[in-house]
Image (spheres, grey):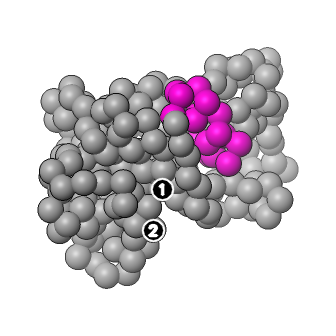
Amino acid sequence: MSARPCPLCESPKTQKISFQKEERLYWRCGECDLRFLDPKHFLTPEEEKKRYSYHQNDENDSGYREFLKPLFDLLRPALRPGMEGLDFGAGKSSALARLFEEEGFSVTRFDPYFFPDQKALARTYDFVFTSEVVEHFFFPRREWDLLHRLLCPQGVLGVMTSLYDPSKMDFEDWYYRKDPTHVSFYGESTLRWIQRHYGFSDLQILPPRTCCFQK
């Protein structure tokens, strides 16, 4: 099988990652260090939506709100009264959007399955946040292009996704990889590539799963 180009940086410098105990095939990019599932193993949209509908992310659940708090705390100091935000990939309900709304911010929700209004993607925002979403990107270059475009000048982008650290984790055994809806996996070097490629002026990374880009 010939090398599959990276779906983020488009480099041809990719290597296969295969496991003895599993048929699913992954790739690692030698340029941006993205690890990604081979598209032949992608779920169908119907299968994806069915799995997402099982998520129990109640916006009133105190434990779930606490889980999201690091991303809220990372973004909050950069925000001023009157700023407007976008919850990209909100899911059925969004506890994180509620946290910002409780602070007086206006938040628009977008989700391709549950809040599919394309008008939400036709404007720009002071801040955009996406929690447990970027790992689902089948076409990460296209989706990161969109996230960058959705930001106003000096806007901030908050991202929550479990970060892969090869010094601490074995990719084959990593629990995050085993979710069949997770197809794109990021480490710190991948986030640094994204910062350079899009010209973000600043990047804060708070392992194990939180980061913030400044446009």
**Residue name at image x 53 percent, y 28 percent:** 199
Mark 1 touches mark 2? (CB < 8 Å) = yes
Q: Which percent across, then down, holds residue 100?
A: 24, 62
| Residue 87 left/right relative to 22 | left
**Residue name at image x 24 percent, y 54 percent:** 80
The residue where tag 2 is placed is 70
**Residue segment shown in magenta:** 184-200
Query: SS class of the residue under badge 1?
Result: strand
Q: Is residue 39 visible?
A: no
| Residue 208 left/right relative to 134 | right
Q: Residues under labels 1 and 2: Cα distance? A: 9 Å
- Quarter the N terminus occupies: top right
- Quarter the C terminus occupies: top left
| Residue 123 left/right relative to 65 | left
**Residue name at image x 83 percent, y 59 percent:** 167
Tell me which numbered mark, 1 or 2, is placed earlier along the sequence. 2
Query: Mark 2 Cα within 10 Å, few/some/many (few <14, many 20+)?
Result: some
- The label on residue 160 is 1
Q: Which percent across, then down, holds residue 94?
A: 26, 60
